[in-house]
Amino acid sequence: MKKKIFIETYGCQMNVYDSELVKTILAEKEYLLVPEESMANIVMLNTCTVRENADRKVLNRVHQIKNSRHQKETILVGILGCMATNFKTKLLEDPKLKIDFIAGPDSYKQLPQLIENAWEHGDKSFDVTLSEFETYSDITPTRKDGINAWLAIMRGCNNFCTFCVVPYTRGRERSRDPYNIVQEIKHLVSEGFSQVTLLGQNVNSYQYDGIDFTDLMRMISDIDGVKRIRYTSPHPKDFPEKLLQLMSEKPAICKQLHMPLQAGNSRVLDKMNRTYTKEEFLALIDLTRHYMPTANISTDIIVGFPTETDQEFEDTIDVIKKVEFDSAFIFKYSERPNTRAAKKFPDDVSEEVKTKRIMRLNDIQNEISLRKKNTQIGQTQTVLVEALYTKRSTDDIQTRNDANQIVILPKVDPPFDINIGDYINVKITGATRNSLKAMFISV
Ligand code: 5AD
Ligand code: SF4
């Protein structure tokens, strides 16, 4: 029987990229990649474990997949990614789950062997070893479309923010050879990709033979044919001014950045081991706007970290009102096994208080996001065509602006020969919470 594989991806962009690596690793063997779970006899879930509800989602999905199949049908389910390293053999030992193999983020080259063990011999096998060296620089991901290419420049994290499980699931920081990265991007350009998004758990820790992240960005922005460069995520603690200057000077680097705040109170930030204060964060935003006055800035915030008081939460509100982020991803604190916070600080903010705080913050941020979008009405912007339809309508085109916002325009506007991957000029005519509306001006 032909081994037919389907990979379902959860979590962050790094996982999307990793699934593309796994596809290449498996396509080199005799596997067939199929487009739907129901067509596969080997299903892999590339998982996230950053919050408890991420775990729950995957475990429910495993039950759903197993229960949807006929008893006699051979179907293997594998767990890849961060849950694999976080729970290790516990996942294999759970009789209710019936998982067949697991592979952590540094073990994807072992997957053909792990699958063989399970397929040929019925052996449940796992590899969750973390590596100090694996960067998969020898593997070209099987990328989906010809617009944006994800590209990991570094892997792992050495920061040990006390709430975060990532240093335990993805291991220590290691950076990829810059010349190898530049070669890959040149190749991507030749394949028609004009946007590249550099990925890393902490991109400004990038370091390879004396080349730092700003040096790498300069090298990439000098490549002919790269029209848009984005990156995620930097850490506010070691964000270099020279990078802001470079971003302001190079048209190819998008004026957009994700700057994770996590909390607005300095005592809470210290307890989180973020190593910056509220004032230092605000100063970094001022510096960013000094170089790029209209930069689009997004953030991540956690509410209800252990011991956070109502008064301290007000500092987070103060920061989001002062900064006016363009968008924010706001989460309730979720205790994660193995983290320093789980070991040292009881999860003592009640669910009810967390809910109140997240609702309040979302209300304030939604109002700010919409107000900031509205200020763009009347502007002319260059957008990249992503799809000739939207989720809602086949009469609309979906595009994206430099700020990484979705811009929707009606097809009825001329011309009809717009293609995916084109850059066109539009006039912004309206705004909703999730997107901007526009009309076509010129190619
Ligand atoms: N609880 C809630 N949110 C978390 N994040 C990371 N760990 C946790 C946790 N234990 C959030 C942070 C991070 C984003 C990717 O997920 O805000 O920036
Ligand atoms: Fe987690 Fe902090 Fe590393 Fe980000 S920087 S992955 S939040 S430990």
Image (cartoon, rainbow, N blue to C red):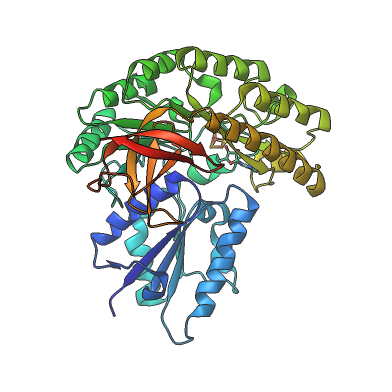
Q: Residue at x 60, y 74 (%)?
A: 96
> Visible in this render: residue 174?
no
The residue nearer to you, when weighing 61 against 290, is 290
Q: Is residue 372 left or right of residue 402?
A: right
- Give the image location of residue 263, x and y in percent: 68, 30
Residue 21 visible here: yes
- Quadrant including the C terminus: top left
Residue 110 image-quadrant placement = bottom left
Is residue 128 or residue 190 the one in the foreground? 190
Q: Quadrant of residue 173 in the image?
A: top left
Quadrant into which the N terminus falls: bottom left
Residue 57's spot in the image, x, y percent? 58, 60
Along the line of sight, the residue nearer the viewer: 135 or 232: 232
Q: Is 209 left, or right, of 407 in this rendering?
A: left
- Seen as rendered, the residue at the extreme left is 190
| Residue occupying the point 28% across, 47% down | 420
Specify the quarter for ligand 1: top right
Q: Is residue 145 depicted above or below 311 in this figure?
A: below
Q: For residue 316, which quarter of the picture? A: top right
**Residue 85 position in % (x across, y down):** 52, 52
Answer above or below: position of 195 versus 88: above
Residue 202: horizontal and vertical position, in percent? Answer: 48, 31
Tally of numbered discs: 0
Would residue 294 appear left or right of 226 to someone viewing this image? right
- Extreme bottom residue here? 72
